[in-house]
Amino acid sequence: EVQLVESGGGLVQAGGSLRLSCATSGFTFDDYAIGWFRQAPGKEREGVSCISSRIGSTYYADSVKGRFTISSDNAKNTLYLQMDTLKPADTAVYFCAADESWGVPTPYEYEYDYWGQGTQVTVSS
């Protein structure tokens, strides 16, 4: 059974940092593209960043480039999202998701087959 469990969310002031983790199980980490999505109140879910470890390819949304860094520890089957210089606009529920294809990662949620339950990130001004 594929499982993805996010952690690391919380409340932080603008300009601060958080690191999200996504512990995965039930699949071979290298065989999947894995990504972070977020959904703010009243808005659609959007792709934030994703990675395909096998081909060393990453994607970042323009809104987070230069502030967020995606990484993975294949030995631990864990995905991370380091979020720096946080802004109130980053406030959202953050989800990790896995795509059964290990090709070039995309920010489109319909491409992803498995989802975690999400972790809340709140950035105060």
Image: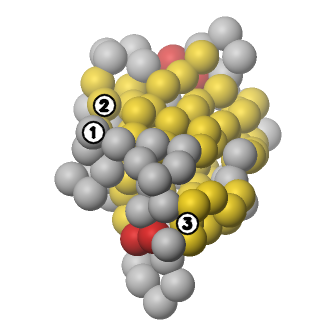
* Image point (66%, 39%), residue name: 22
Percent x, y for residue 19? 60, 39
The answer to whether one can see residue 58 in this image is: yes
Q: Return the residue nearer the eye: 98 or 5.
A: 5
Q: Are marks 1 and 3 in contact (CB under 8 Å)?
A: no
Q: Nearer the viewer, mark 2 or mark 1?
A: 1
Q: CA distance from mark 2 to mark 3?
A: 25 Å
The N terminus sits in image quarter: top right
Distance from label 2 to label 1 (Cα)?
Answer: 13 Å
Colouring method of the image: secondary structure
**Which residue type does callout 2 highlight?**
Thr
Q: Which mark is residue 52?
A: none
Q: Amino acid type of disc 1?
A: Gly
* Residue 40 image point, x, y percent: 49, 76
Q: Which residue is mark 3?
A: 123
Foreground residue among 104 and 38: 38
| Left-right relation of 30 to 121 | left
Q: Residues within 10 Å of mark 1 (few under 14, many from 20)?
A: few
* Label at residue 66: 1
Residue at the extreme top = 75
Q: Dot 1: what SS?
A: loop
Mark 2 secondary-structure assignment = strand
Q: Secondary structure at mark 3?
A: strand
According to the picture, the residue beneath numbered tag 2 turns out to be: 58
Q: In terms of sequence position, does the residue under pointer 2 or pointer 3 come before the other?
A: 2
Q: How many marks?
A: 3
Left or right of 98, for residue 28:
right
